[in-house]
Amino acid sequence: KDIKIYTIEGAKLAAEMGNTKIFNMVVLGGYLKVKPIVKLENVIKGLKKSLHERYHKLIPLNEDAITMGMKHVVLK
């Protein structure tokens, strides 16, 4: 009774966004909606700091994927 189950169609959402590799970011967004342990802006700062500069062009896609996950997580 004390366990909550959330669902998210991460693979489907990532495919709809045109890149199945962002599945993990969609799921991260769902998790952050349920357990906001880190702010979205801090995740983006972390990506900018940890990713090589040549991948910075993908950061907006990752941010959109996180936001998508936040919007589509569902309590079962």
Image (spheres, rainbow, N blue to C red):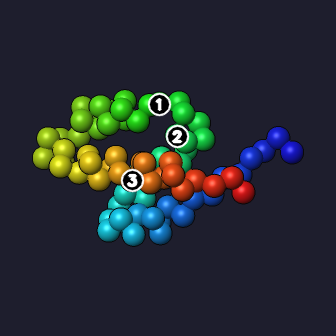
Residue under pointer 1: 38
For image coordinates 23% across by 51% down, the residue present is 58
Label 2 and label 3: CA atoms lie apart by 12 Å
Label 1 and label 2: CA atoms lie apart by 7 Å
Label 3 and label 1: CA atoms lie apart by 16 Å
Side (left or right) of 12 relative to 58: right
For image coordinates 42% across by 48% down, the residue present is 66
- Residue at the farthest right position: 1
For label 2, the crowd category at 10 Å Cα-Cα, with few meaning under 14, some 14 to 19 and many 20 or more, is: some
Side (left or right) of 9 relative to 13: right
For image coordinates 54% across by 56% down, the residue present is 72
Q: Position of residue 56 (x, y in %)?
A: 19, 44
Quarter holding residue 14: bottom left
Q: Is residue 66 above or below residue 17?
A: above
Q: Is residue 3 above or below residue 68?
A: above
Q: Position of residue 41 (x, y in %)?
A: 36, 32
Whichever of labels 1 and 2 marks the residue nearer the N terminus, that label is 2
Q: Position of residue 30 (x, y in %)?
A: 53, 48
Residue under pointer 3: 65
Q: Is residue 62 above or below residue 12?
A: above
Question: The residue under label 3 is which amino acid type?
Answer: Ala
Mark 1 and mark 2 residues within 8 Å of each other at the beta carbon: yes
Whichever of labels 2 and 3 marks the residue nearer the N terminus, that label is 2
Whichever of labels 3 and 1 marks the residue nearer the N terminus, that label is 1
Question: The residue under label 2 is which amino acid type?
Answer: Leu
Question: The residue under label 1 is which amino acid type?
Answer: Val
Residue under pointer 2: 32
Residue 24 shows in the view: no
Give the position of the N terminus as an image quadrant: top right
